Amino acid sequence: MKRSGCIVSRLAVLGTLALLGPARVESQEASASSGRVNQVLEWNQIFIDTLVATNTANSSSQRLGAIVHTAIFDAYNSIDRRFTPVFVHSAAPTDASARAAVIAAAYTALVGLFPSQQPTLDVSYAASLANLIDHCDHRGPPPGRRRPCATRIERGVAWGSEVAHAVLGWRANDGFSLSYPPFVGGTAVGQWRPVPPATSMSAQGLAFTDPFVLVSNTQFQPEPPRGLHTSRYTRDFDTVTSLGRKTGSSRTDDQTALAPFWEGNASVHWNQAANQIARANALSIADSNRLLAVLNIAMADTAFTVWSAKRYYGASPFAVTWRPATSIPLADTDGNPETAPDPGWVPLVTTPSHPEYPAGHPSQNGAAATVLLAHFHRRQTFTLTTNGQPSRTYTSITQARSDGNNARVWGGMHYPSTVAVSDRLGEAIAEYVNEHSMTRLRR
């Protein structure tokens, strides 16, 4: 890659900090003196905050997280080389600061993806660099390093920015942003069709987006959904009819509260969990870097796989992909004598506008929980948030995964067998990403 020549000086950083006021500077100095900051976790939290501030749709968040953490991973890893890279294979400049590279890569990627948030990101960027400079000045150059702090930080910033621009350029042509003809499914019995007021499939571009690590979006395509005349479909139908209805359901009060909570952004939830667990376990910056890259890439490749399968099966008049909001009122047409129609049935949570099979959120829960369980014991404490809902504190990764999956049935959006298949799909993809990418190098 061509060197960008981007240099950020100490004076420029301190000049920006002067605009923040003495309280913010004092806060940053206190943070620097209290201990070394993990810049990967710091900027992962800024990514989470940016998703929340912009109310970014869940369907596009996984791709964004993978872009940000690919940039961070490759920027840091090319300086402190421990694993195979995701995309950028070039050598970093000699004596570049890996921590400065993380800051610059994260900032550059986030500004590229969220240009409206640049003023807020500028503040975080200046404060983060000032903290690093302050720590470096207090400790002096590390043993064996001849270059002063300012030079190493400048080189790290230039490198991090360069890596982020390379990753942004790579993903600019990944198929996500292209225009596709509206997809409306069909009217065959069992086939998905939009639930009014929706008129077509949402986020269809995900079905045609190039994966980060997988060979293709069909590498892990799930088996066809259960048929209308199977006992499994009958059990699915009865369960969601009883549990998923808006009024008169058999849900508990807590289940009723969990359904809209877990309708929240999966990338926000599982990055919150990963960040808090990593901090509680004092994960190193290098290990945090790989953890969050694997997490976000696994979630992204899972999303592309699921949407590809939704689009594929949703186009078939023989695959059962209709939503409960359609199947329950029209049960008298399904040819199954064990199902009974309920014309007034309405789900607790508004039905998303894409085929029922496979399921997006459960696949994300399976992928994310699998990554975390590969690194930590299941008993961990973390707090998750959803806009407009009370926060939830969990003491188990597996319990969060279970609640998130069951919430799709409690909300009336999915059938239990779809949830189970989709969770296993996410798990399989996460295992593949963890085992086949960012592999440890022999020293």
Image (tube, grey):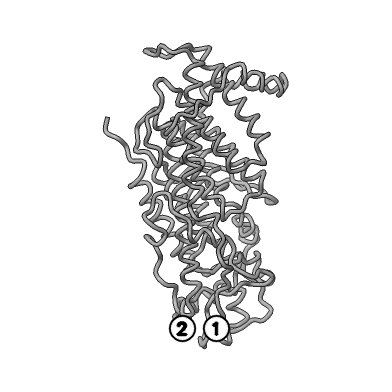
Count of marks overlaid on the render: 2
What residue lies at 70% left-to-right and 51% top-to-bottom? 388
In the rendered structure, are the residues bearing label 2 and label 1 in contact, judged by CB atoms less than 8 Å apart? no
Looking at the image, which is closer to me, 280 or 47? 47
Which image quarter holds the N terminus?
Answer: top left
As helix, strand or loop, the secondary structure at mark 2 comes to loop
Q: Work out whether 366 lies above or below 141.
A: below
What residue lies at 62% left-to-right and 47% top-to-bottom? 385
Looking at the image, which is closer to me, 431 or 147? 147
Q: Which mark is residue 339?
A: 1
Type of amino acid at the residue the image marks with label 2: His
Q: Is residue 238 visible?
A: no
Which image quarter holds the C terminus?
Answer: top left
Q: Is residue 362 left or right of residue 431?
A: right
Circle 2 crowding by C-alpha within 10 Å: few under 14, some 14–19, many from 20: some
**Residue 292, percent from left and from top:** 47, 41
**Residue 109, percent from left and from top:** 54, 38
Type of amino acid at the residue the image marks with label 1: Thr
**Residue 272, percent from left and from top:** 55, 42
**Which residue is disc 2 drawn over?**
229
